Amino acid sequence: MSTFNRYQSTKTEDARFCTTKYPKFEKRPTDLYIISRDKDRLDLISNQFYEDPRYWWVIAKANNLGKGTFDIPVGIQLRIPFPLTDLTTQLREVQDNR
């Protein structure tokens, strides 16, 4: 498990407004696809596939899911970007490009 702060690329030009920039998760042949079931949540799916619930935001970003909840509608197809071996590099690139 790599350690990084997902807020390391947070832009703070004005202390009242913070914007977090996330990397883009382009589709790859290694990505996994699942159909959501009853009681699925982003953090639980993240823990299942990445062995860490903190990566829930990767799945949310890859599937254009809105903010505010870990809950997922039943029966939708979710793309799980896999593997996440280059995530730290992607986050650094986003930070360098701000």
Image (tube, rainbow, N blue to C red):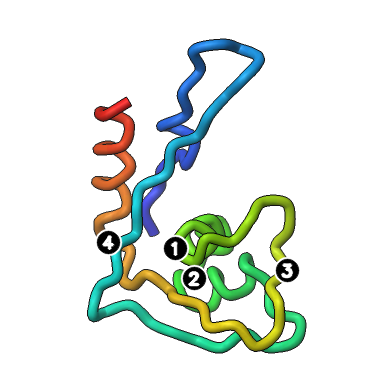
Question: Can you tell which of label 2 and label 4 is closer to the viewer?
Answer: 4
The local secondary structure at tag 4 comes to loop
Tell me the number on the disc at residue 71: 3
Q: Percent position (x, y) of residue 69?
A: 73, 58
Q: In the rendered structure, which disc, 2 or 4, sits on the residue that comes first in sequence?
A: 2
Q: Callout 4, which amino acid? A: Thr
| Comes first in the chain, label 3 or label 2 | 2
Find the distance from the CA under tag 1 to the CA under tag 4. Answer: 16 Å
Amino acid type at mark 2: Glu
Counting from the top left corner in percent of width and height, residue 21 is at: 44, 37
For residue 64, above or below residue 93: below
Residue under numbered circle 2? 51
Q: Counting residues from the N terminus, which is met first, the one under dot 1 or under dot 4? A: 1
Snapshot quadrant of residue 98: top left
Q: Secondary structure at mark 2?
A: loop
Q: CA distance from mark 4 to mark 3?
A: 26 Å
On the rendered structure, is 37 left or right of 3? right
Q: Position of residue 60 (x, y in %)?
A: 54, 61
* C-alpha span from label 2 to label 1: 18 Å
Distance between mark 2 and mark 4 Cα atoms: 13 Å
Mark 1 = which residue? 62
Q: Secondary structure at mark 3?
A: loop
The kind of residue tagged 3 is Asp
Foreground of the two, 87 or 13: 13
> Image point 44% across, 63% down: which residue?
62
Tell us which disc is closer to us: 3 or 2. Answer: 3
At horizontal 76% and vertical 81% (from top left) the residue drawn is 39
Q: Quadrant of the N terminus?
A: bottom left
